[in-house]
Amino acid sequence: MFKISEFSKLSQVPAKTLRFYDQLELLKPAYTDQQNGYRYHKSEQLLDLHRILAFKDLGFTLGQIKQLLNDNVSTEEIRRMFRLKQKALHSLIQSEMERLRRIEVRLEQIERQSDGLSHYEVVVKKVEPLMVATLKETTDRASIPGLFEEIDEYLKWNGIPLPVTHMVLWYSCTKCEYSIDLEIACPISRKLQDTARFQTKVLPEMAVASVTHMSSPDIYTPVSIDLGSWIEENGYRIIPEIPSREVYLSTQENNKLRYVTESQMPILGSGFIQ
């Protein structure tokens, strides 16, 4: 048998790591001297240690490795664990490939010096389901601030404290001057009494490409066009059936009609489960 220092040199695994594996009952010493506490390992335990290192190299956690080394674990359970790890790695690789593609496109844009979003950073993310109070209207952009005030009055009447985040859901052309189909929405924590004018609904979960910028809700900005171009260049597809959103987060300190705004455009991409 080998002392732990000797076994460490033989296996090229630090003694500190071997002690940690002992604490986890992942690799117990073959013998421990009760008088001096010295740990001893058998040469055959190099096989067990090699299996631990091999499973670790495959990305399994020490807890999973302990389960894999259990003599009572079935072949089917081992197969299931490997399939789950395989699926997780495929997902990670796909996500990283998409990230690489976005970096490559961004580098191309920098080289061309013609990127409309050069002052913004696009983020691809998942938006969780959200309960909102809504007000639907066919109108023009100039009317949006007034619609914000109208829905605020409705929320105040229902005991919802202000200020709240305002959202605009665009059902038709965002750059049109008149007759835009849109919906004003504000997040709420409970269902409110519906009226002929106001409704409570839950906005669905979706994947979006988003960019944060400064804007005024009553003035058209070309950010949505630039964002659409970015989506196409990065291999995603816009979902036309789902309205794009503008989330007006907070007003500028000296200009109550100018907001920090997040533009969100729903997308399809291989990295998302539909």
Image (cartoon, grey):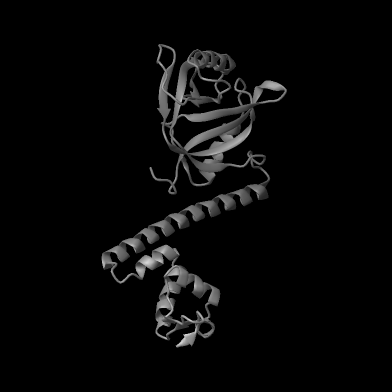
Closer to us: 44 or 194: 44
**Horizontal arrangement in the rendering, residue 243 relative to residue 248 (left or right):** left
Give residue 225's position: percent from left, percent from top: 57, 33
Q: Which residue is drawn at 56% across and 42% down?
A: 123
Give residue 27's position: percent from left, percent from top: 42, 74
Give residue 55's position: percent from left, percent from top: 42, 70
Q: Is residue 134 above or below residue 106?
A: above
Quadrant where the N terminus lies?
bottom left
Q: Can residue 179 be seen in this view?
A: no
Picture quarter containing residue 115? top right
Picture quarter containing residue 51? bottom left
Spot the residue most to the front: 35
Closer to us: 24 or 63: 24
Spot the residue most to the bottom: 1
Q: Which residue is drawn at 43% across and 54% down?
A: 91
Closer to us: 237 or 122: 122
Q: How many labels does the image show?
A: 0
Q: Is residue 139 visible?
A: yes
Closer to us: 234 or 253: 253
Spot the residue most to the right: 254
Quadrant where the C terminus lies?
top left
Q: In this view, does 220 lie above or below 154?
A: below
Q: Residue at x 51, y 55 (%)?
A: 96
Give residue 203's position: percent from left, percent from top: 43, 29
